[in-house]
Image (cartoon, helix red, strand yellow):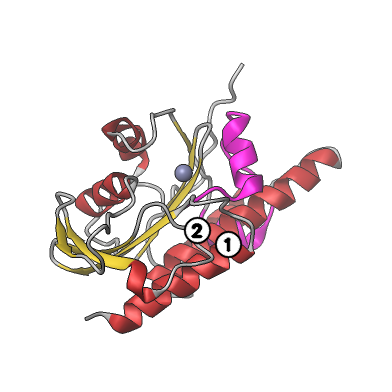
Amino acid sequence: MYEDIKEQIADVCHRMWDKGWVAANDGNVTVKVGEGLFLATRTGISKHDITPAHIGLIDGEFNIIEAPADDWKPSSEAKLHMRCYADRPDVNAVIHAHPPFATGFACAHMSLDDYCMIESVLTIGAVPLTPYGTPSTYEVCDAVAPYLQEHDVFLLENHGALSVGCDLMTAYFRMETLEQQAHISLIARLLGGAVDIRREDIDKLISLRPNYGITGRHPGYKKFPKKG
Ligand SMILES: [Zn+2]
């Protein structure tokens, strides 16, 4: 069952590996396929090697409903994904990866609130840095939860990035936009500093979201307090 979606999940995993967003067995993807039913990537496999045969079905409590192999287990980070689905009924797909530019900001304990590039202002807005949590524990869920209602993309402190969407490609493209924005911001900062778009033009861009059919949440114009 769900063969088309399993193919799409495998394709997204391959794109993540090709882009260098994951090393070894890093990263995980889930998709909601029904009330309390989720397809999940297995634990302990390179995203380069994922096929539909490595994708199983779990429920919201992390119980295995359908395993493609006897030793199949979902990624332990699926707990964090389940929290996103529980708190955001509009979310149908969640992606976690370690894209290097975005993760660089997360490791430097810097949120990403440059409003310097039209596309990212329009689609993701300011990206919060969520507090540190031990991987695979509910600490990470609790760290991300306060930001879930306003944002679709998150930097996980000293860890990586998370994106959510109404479907898998939306979540995937948000991660692409985040990584490109982090790359561009880094270059702009090296060149002397990113220059924000004027506030009234930022507000205009945000108000255009419905015209472009952009789904999800946007924080509006928001700047995070600087650390230190
Ligand atoms: Zn991770």
**Under 8 Å from ligand 1: the CB of mark 2?**
no
Circle nearer the N terminus (2, 1): 1
Residue at image location 34% in from the left, 73% down from the top: 53
- Quadrant position of the N terminus in the picture: bottom left
The answer to whether residue 63 shows anywhere in this view is yes
In the rendered image, the residue lying farthest to the front is 70
Instruction: Say left or right for 25 vs 165.
Output: right
Judge by depth and name the residue closer to the eye, 206 or 20: 20
Instruction: Say left or right for 194 vs 221.
Output: right
Quadrant in which residue 144 is drawn: top left
Q: What numbered label is drawn on residue 17? A: 1
Q: Which residue is mark 2?
A: 46
Q: Amino acid at mark 1?
A: Trp
**What secondary structure is marked by label 2?**
loop
**What secondary structure is marked by label 1?**
helix
- Image position, residue 145 (x, y; %): 30, 39
Residue at image location 35% in from the left, 32% down from the top: 143
How many residues crowd around disc 1 within 10 Å: few (fewer than 14), some, or many (20 or more)?
A: many
Q: What numbered label is drawn on residue 114? A: none
Q: Nearer the viewer, mark 2 or mark 1?
A: 2
Which stretch appears magenta? 95-124
Residue at image location 83% in from the left, 39% down from the top: 190
